[in-house]
Image (spheres, rainbow, N blue to C red):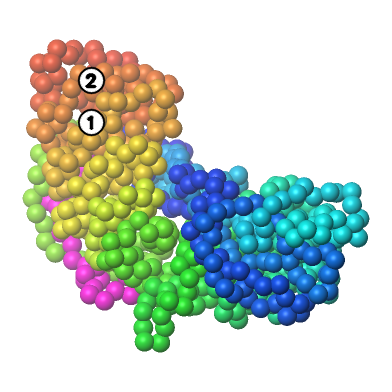
Amino acid sequence: MTVEPIRSTLATVSTDDTSLVLPSDKMQRTGQQRVLEQVKSIKRNKSKMVKKDSIPSPTSPASMTEYSEPKFQFSPTNMNGTLFKSSGSSMTASHKRMTVRSLSVPNAGRSTTVRINRATGQSMKLLENNQLARSQTIIKPSPIQSQTVRKVSLTKSKSEALGASSAEGSLPNITLQEAVEFLSNSDISYQLCGASFIQHQTFTEESSKQEVWRLGGIPALIQLLKSDNSLLHQTAAAALRNLAFKDHSNKLEVDHCEGIEAILTLLRNSNDTETHKQLTGLLWNLSSADKLKPELIRNALPLLTETIVVPYSVWTDSNTNKLIDPEVFYNTTGCVRNLSCASEDERITMRSCPQLIDSLVTYIQTQMDRGEPDDKSVENCVCILHNLSYQLETEAPEQFKQISVLDTRPKENNNKSLFSPKSSKTQKDFKFPAMEKEKPEGVNWLYNQKTLQLYRSLLGSSQKEATLEACCGALQNLTASKSSLSTLMSQSFIEKLNGLPVISPLLISGNSSLQKTAMSLVGNMSRVSSLRGAMAKDVFPMVSSVLSNVTSNMIKSDSTIATACRVMQTLMLAEPETSKKMISPKLVESLTALSSNMSFETGRKAAGFLLWSMWGQKDIQSVLKKQGMIKDTFINDVTATAYEAATRMKAH
């Protein structure tokens, strides 16, 4: 398909019709701060000194209230009889909300975010290469493994390293090369020592990740996942998890060494909770690599859904979510959240995964019923629904064949301006039985009335900006086109669910990404002429506030500002009486400055056209004159250029 030229945001359709999001959270702490916080909240298990080849899972639960640097409780004088103490406890996965950056692209003036689909004009929020770690977790060796740390000497021989410290609580004085060699030793004590040392080093020193790769440590660690020892499983998985964190080549190396197969085999066969924590965290890290997503969706997603997502979300007589740790579910939904931002074919595959969507919705509803809308896994689940709603009408057309026109109602907009929003003489009403289905299943959940109500409830109760943005993004996707479905979704959310009161405040959010998504959603819904009266009352004041306070340091919000200008113009033409009360000298002054600020590529053009349109409306013009404003403020070379550009756009 031929790529069309970039279209101006002055087009009379939404500039940001659809969106897709990956895990990211700008409000999260650093990796080490996250670990510090999580160690304090997760119960740890003590492990006993045991003889080689007889290493049970840690026992005797103990609550950890303090954090300390890792060490190895290793007895160098009795290698064959003792083993350093180690816990298989894992740190949990953390993620960050995506920042959103948009460009205007063709096809009805739609705009994309970060990764541009010029053929469809829709958007995906994708992490750049240097942002891959934002959706991932790094594991630090358990504090039970350690209390103090000594620097590793790179000059000691193996014998010197093993005999360097007889005091329990010291880090073995070995090199990374020796640690990797330990992984292939027949003595499990050496294997555990090597894996734990690598786990520690890859947490504290970024450069050690590539060194382990160079030394062949990754295939050796994967081989340990095939052992019969659960403590070795946990430690090897934790080391791999650190190695894959923020290191794209190591992610690919895990796959190249058939690591994904080994991970899934162990996850399927192991009943150990700590092992599950480590493995699902490792899968979460791997899932941010685009090259691995097809394999993970094909092989990991069915297993994760069947063994974790469904049992944890849905209570039945035959299963109980008490058997699955909350952190395992959180890690799993983080992984699925990454996977849901894949290609069209892969999204289609995910939508058809049995019980996946049903379980996600059920979990969200359960947490809402418990009064926990800010549960961290709720955020993941809503983001997955958001992503799976991307291009839904195009990718699942069979779902929408039963939409029919019920009747028509008179259109209330009598404005005759050249640039009045185009619409038919009557407003259509539609019938879509699937949307009202009492017991939705699978893909039907993505557009069912119950899910819209769930988004509305979350928007009214959640304090997490990522959750709010995901709800807005899902609604943005469902209202993206000029089709009957988008009209029906907009009407349902505003008229049946009274959704404007929970959307409008987000238009002035201090979070630019959330504000952008909310503004794009409002832009989509403003295309439905029958909704403009209600929207003018709730939305116009917020949009006016945004445009009255534009400053030169808001360049990153250029597309949001352009969308705000378009929304204001649409509502101003549809509801001039409401508009007259909101237009002030401060607003006009801000728009005037914006229209001549060359730093705002799309916002200045939209502002110039809005100013021209204001003076072109007689009702608005009279109000402007009463406030002492003159024609030259609105009709000048700058606004004329914007007007001419918009006129050409109309002609096309």
| Residue 146 rendering spot, x and y as whole percentages | 67, 58
Q: Which region shows up in magenta?
A: 421-444
Q: Secondary structure at mark 1?
A: helix
Q: Residue furthest front?
A: 167
Q: Which residue is mark 1?
A: 544
Q: Can residue 325 be seen in this snapshot?
A: yes
| Residue 622 rendering spot, x and y as whole percentages | 10, 20
Q: How many marks?
A: 2
Q: Can residue 484 be seen in this snapshot?
A: no
| Residue 650 rendering spot, x and y as whole percentages | 30, 36
Image-quadrant location for residue 592: top left
Q: Residue at x 63, y 76 (%)?
A: 57
Seen in the image, is 383 located left or right of residue 201?
Answer: left
Foreground residue among 102 and 134: 134
Image-quadrant location for residue 212: bottom right
Foreground residue among 178 and 101: 178
Is 622 placed above or below 170 here? Answer: above
Q: Residue at x 17, y 34 (%)?
A: 573
Label annotation for residue 586: 2
Is 425 one of the magenta-colored residues?
yes
| Residue 437 rendering spot, x and y as whole percentages | 23, 73
| Quadrant placement of the C terminus | top left
Q: Residue at x 9, y 44 (%)?
A: 412
- 3D distance between C-alphas at marks 2 and 1: 10 Å
